[in-house]
Amino acid sequence: MFSLSWLARSGASAVATALLLAGLAGGAQAKEAPSNGISTATPALAEIQLRELPVQAQETHRLVHAGGPFPYSKDGAVFGNRERLLPRKARGFYREYTVKTPSARNRGARRLVCGGTPQTAPEVCFYTDDHYASFKRIRAQAVR
């Protein structure tokens, strides 16, 4: 920590000192955890229309709703939501599916993560094109 008297001696203006202290206090408040130590808040997710997704993601979405067959062995695996970017649900609620990436030698970074009972119509699906760093909730019209 630093001494406030040092700030006064250093010629810092009262306004700068007040802003610095307000910033420090705000930072301390932001780090406080709820009384139970578990945060249930999730950030607001952007939404995207199904038709706005890459064609490969639209195809994966169709396969999910049809129950497969899926081209990758890991498709349908439980998604743990360790990043806590999606709404908090019981383990096993979310499943992940690979979205083919043209020119990728491996599975690439694109995925659909769908929630609900597997192999039936999911309640909700999310798209990520950056390997779980961000998600967009898919707003889909009736699946045909």
Image (cartoon, rainbow, N blue to C red):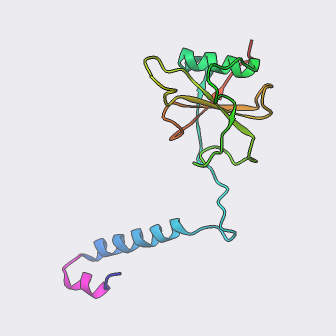
- Residue at horizontal 64 percent and vertical 60 percent from the top: 39
- Residue at horizontal 67 percent and vertical 56 percent from the top: 40
x then y, percent, for residue 15: 30, 72
x then y, percent, for residue 9: 20, 85
Q: Is residue 103 left or right of residue 136?
A: left
Q: Is residue 116 above or below residue 52?
A: below
- Residue at horizontal 19 percent and vertical 81 percent from the top: 10
Q: Quadrant of the C terminus?
A: top right
Q: Nearer the viewer, residue 48 or 113?
A: 113
Prevailing secondary structure of the magenta residues: helix
Q: Is residue 131 left or right of residue 50?
A: left
Q: How many marks?
A: 0
Q: Is residue 14 above or below residue 89?
A: below
Find the residue positioned furthest to the bottom: 5
Please report the bounds of the magenta region as a residue range: 4-12
Q: Is residue 11 left or right of residue 104?
A: left
Q: Nearer the viewer, residue 34 or 92?
A: 92
Q: Nearer the viewer, residue 20 or 114?
A: 114
Residue 6 forms part of the magenta stretch: yes
Quarter of the image where one finds residue 112: top right
Q: Is residue 11 left or right of residue 67?
A: left
Q: Is residue 141 above or below residue 96?
A: above
Residue 133 forms part of the magenta stretch: no
Q: Quadrant of the N terminus?
A: bottom left
Quarter of the image where one finds residue 5: bottom left
- Residue at horizontal 19 percent and vertical 79 percent from the top: 11
x then y, percent, for residue 71: 63, 19
x then y, percent, for residue 116: 77, 35
